[in-house]
Every structure is written in structure tokens, then in C-alpha cells.
């Protein structure tokens, strides 16, 4: 009896070992593969993965809340068929769902918090590092179709301990990337507070070689900086930019700011240059 009970176990071990030796591990399970490799190896259908979110990010249903002030941010209309929530605002992880057809990503959805809904035919890559997730999502933004690229940017900004703004600046400046994706990169740059981002946005506005729509998006992003941090840059744009359309956009957003520095600029513009002979 002992021999009969041991033999099936030994047989199963031998079979498993032969499968490993033959390389019959499920696609993407091999250690060291990148997310891109694992997605490319997946069968047609749904591929999903998770990664650690920033501490100031939580989500529920269609909404993601970013920042300690609890401001609501969304990446567009998204289905909740992939995820369900118990808490009002779950602090991570970030969840990314990819539609894959013929080894290419054709759709992308992202969420924060909650838990996966039970589903069949799903390739689950499990938990990946925030750095690896951000690198993969940025690559989708750069190389994927616009319907995927623009949606890849938002979750890339949510990873814990990931500095993403330099990559977003590269996307904003890259003329080979669709304008819609570039404008989304500028928008999310505008949501990141800080002097460094403000300075780079101002530089982006000043670059005549950058598409006008992207520069106008950068003007808007400056207007969204907290505590009036973007006002000096907007004033500079309104006074010096060579593109009348960009100057007009800067003046418009200055008009929405209720900032006394903007009022002073308007007064100077409307008063006009000093009249000849005026003392």
C-alpha cells in the first residue's frame, strides 16, 4: 500500500520535471522576461497586472483620487467589468488591463484599488515593480496606437517612488508621437506640482518647433499649477511668445486665475504705451 501511494506522487513529480526540462512553462512565466515580452507571448484576449501605487493615490469605480487634498482625477470613461470594490477609496494597487490581439495591445484600462473580478481566458502577470510598469506603459505611449498610448500615460504617473516627468517631457517633444498622446503627456505634467515641472513646461511653450496644440496644452498645464506657481511663466508667455494664438491662450488662463499679478499685466496692456509728450 505504501508503494502504491508513493508511485502516483513520484510519477507526477517526474512529469512536472520533464515539462520544465522541455520548456513547457506557460508563456511569460520564465524569470527575467520583461512585461513587453510576456504580453507579446500571451494569447489573444485579456492580459492584466498590478503594481504598487503612490501613498497619496486611491480609487473606486471610475474615479482615482490623487494628492493629499483628495482631488478627483480620471483617465476617461472606463468600464468596471474588470474590478470590484468594497471600500470607498482603496489605496492601491494600480491595476492595468490590456486587450491583446495578434500579439499587439489594442486596448487599455486602468484602475486603483479593489480586487479582480473572476474571469476566464485572462493572462494574469501578477504583481510587477512600479518601475517596470512605468517603463512599459511609457513604451506603449511612445509606440502604441493613440487609443492605447494616451491611456497608458495616466497609470504610469501613479507608481510608487517612480519619477516619470522626464519621460513625459520626451513624449511631449517627440513629433513622431500622435499629438493627442503628446497633449495627454502635457496635461499630466501639469498635474505634477513643482518648480522643475513648471520650468520645463515654460520651456516647452517657448519652443517654436513644437506643434502649436502641444504648446497650448502646456500653457493650460501651467495654469493648473497650485498656489499660482505657473502665473509668472504665463505672464512671460503672454508678453514674449511669438505665436499670437499661444499668447492669447496664456492671457485667457491668466484671466481665470484671479491673481493680482495677472491684473497688473492686464492694466499695462490695456493702458497701452505712454503717449508722446506725456509727462
Image (cartoon, grey):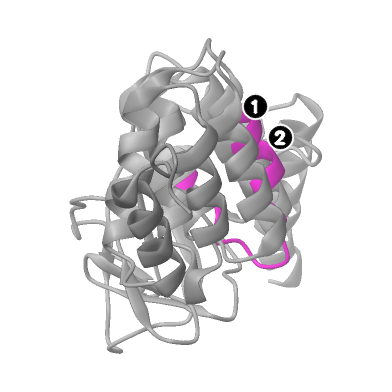
Q: CA distance from mark 1 to mark 2?
A: 5 Å
Q: Is residue 107 visible?
A: yes
Residue 173 colored in magenta in the image = no
Q: Point out residue 6 in the picture as x, y percentages from the top left corner.
A: 73, 64
Residue sitting at x 58%, y 30%: 206
Q: Are marks 1 and 2 in contact (CB under 8 Å)?
A: yes
* Front in this rendered view, residue 272 or 21: 272
- How crowded pointer 2 is (Cα within 10 Å; few <14, some 14-19, many 20+) is rated as some
Q: Secondary structure at mark 1?
A: helix
- Give the magenta range: 152-171
Give the dominant element type of the magenta stretch: helix, strand or loop: helix
Q: Point out residue 277 in the picture as x, y percentages from the top left corner.
A: 44, 41
* Front in this rendered view, residue 117 or 9: 117
Residue sitting at x 27%, y 69%: 63
Q: Is residue 28 visible?
A: no
Q: Is residue 171 above or below residue 269?
A: above
* Front in this rendered view, residue 37 or 4: 37
Q: Point out residue 213 in the picture as x, y percentages from the top left corner.
A: 36, 25
Q: Point out residue 61 in the picture as x, y percentages from the top left corner.
A: 22, 70
| Image quarter hosting the N terminus | bottom right
Q: Secondary structure at mark 2?
A: loop
Residue that mark 1 sits on:
37
Residue that mark 2 sits on:
34
Q: Is residue 121 above or below residue 103?
A: below
Amino acid at each position: 500500500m505504501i508503494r502504491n501511494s508513493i508511485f502516483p506522487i513520484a510519477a507526477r513529480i517526474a512529469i512536472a520535471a520533464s515539462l520544465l526540462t522541455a520548456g513547457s512553462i506557460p508563456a511569460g512565466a520564465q524569470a527575467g522576461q520583461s512585461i513587453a515580452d510576456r504580453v507579446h507571448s500571451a494569447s489573444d484576449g485579456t492580459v492584466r497586472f498590478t503594481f504598487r501605487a503612490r501613498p497619496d493615490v486611491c480609487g473606486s469605480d471610475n474615479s482615482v483620487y490623487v494628492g493629499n487634498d483628495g482631488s478627483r482625477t480620471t483617465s476617461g470613461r472606463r468600464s468596471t467589468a474588470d474590478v470590484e470594490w468594497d471600500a470607498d477609496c482603496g489605496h492601491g494597487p494600480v491595476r492595468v488591463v490590456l486587450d491583446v490581439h495578434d500579439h499587439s495591445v489594442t486596448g487599455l484600462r486602468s484602475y486603483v484599488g479593489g480586487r479582480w473580478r473572476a474571469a476566464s481566458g485572462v493572462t494574469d502577470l501578477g504583481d510587477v515593480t512600479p518601475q517596470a510598469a512605468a517603463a512599459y506603459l511609457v513604451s506603449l505611449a511612445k509606440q502604441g496606437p493613440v487609443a492605447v498610448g494616451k491611456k497608458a500615460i495616466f497609470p504610469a504617473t501613479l507608481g510608487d517612488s517612480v519619477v516619470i516627468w522626464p519621460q513625459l517631457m520626451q513624449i511631449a517633444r517627440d513629433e513622431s508621437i500622435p499629438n493627442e498622446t503628446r497633449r495627454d503627456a502635457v496635461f499630466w505634467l501639469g498635474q505634477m506640482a513643482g518648480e522643475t515641472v513648471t520650468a520645463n513646461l515654460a520651456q516647452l511653450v517657448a519652443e517654436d518647433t513644437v506643434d502649436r496644440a502641444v504648446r497650448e496644452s502646456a500653457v493650460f498645464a501651467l495654469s493648473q499649477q497650485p498656489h499660482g506657481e505657473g502665473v509668472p511663466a504665463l505672464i512671460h508667455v503672454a508678453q514674449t511668445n511669438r505665436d499670437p494664438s499661444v499668447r492669447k491662450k496664456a492671457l485667457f488662463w491668466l484671466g481665470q486665475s484671479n491673481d493680482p499679478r495677472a491684473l497688473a499685466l492686464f492694466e499695462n496692456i490695456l493702458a497701452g504705451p505712454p503717449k508722446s509728450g506725456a509727462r
